[in-house]
Amino acid sequence: MLADGCAKLQRAVVRWPVLLMVLVTVCGLAFADPTPAPVRAEIDAMLNRLETSACEFQRNGTWHDSARAKAHLLDKLGYIEKRGAVQSAEQFIELAASRSSMSGKPYQVRCGGAAPVESNQWLREQLTAIRGSSRGTPR
């Protein structure tokens, strides 16, 4: 009888650290810092350029219109934001907008009759243009 009680106590003691780790992780995710406003503004500007570009976006071998591409990348942004703040637009491109998290295949962008380019390159070019156009405006 005493052995049964000791075994139950031992299992409870082993469970507490696990439960504590789960609680700390969940609380940490619930209180994750939001993406800084200037970073989010650059990401939104890139995705708006994609949406209004009339370019097509390929993921996992299928071409999608630019509005659907923007929606997909916003979903991925939300997913990575739940795990912590996105510190830069480049980090967003690398973590969410360069390749499929399912297949690992690079995303591609095709505009008009031009050859497709990897989304990493296309988005970085857009980011450079966005930053270039914002230099002349006061902050």
Image (cartoon, rainbow, N blue to C red):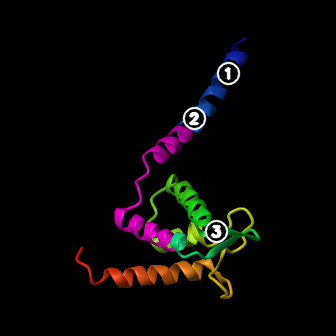
- Judging by the rendered image, the residue that carries numbered circle 1 is 8
Q: Which residues are magenta?
A: 21-49
Q: Earlier in the sequence, mark 3 or mark 1?
A: 1
Q: Secondary structure at mark 1?
A: helix
Tell me if 40 is positioned left or right of 68 in this view. Answer: left
Q: In x, y percent, where is residue 104?
A: 72, 69
x%, y% of residue 45?
43, 70
Among numbered discs 2 and 1, the one appearing first in the sequence:
1
Residue shown at 60%/29% (left/top)?
13
What label sits on residue 65 in the rendered view? 3
Residue at image position (41%, 71%) is: 42
Say which amino acid is labelled 1. Lys
* Magenta-colored stretch includes residue 3: no
In whole angstroms, how far apart are the C-alphas of marks 3 and 2? 45 Å
Q: Are marks 2 and 1 in contact (CB under 8 Å)?
A: no
Q: Is residue 38 above or below residue 114?
A: above
Residue sitting at the far top: 1
* Magenta stretch holds residue 30: yes
Q: Amino acid at mark 3?
A: Asp
- According to the image, label 2 marks what residue? 19
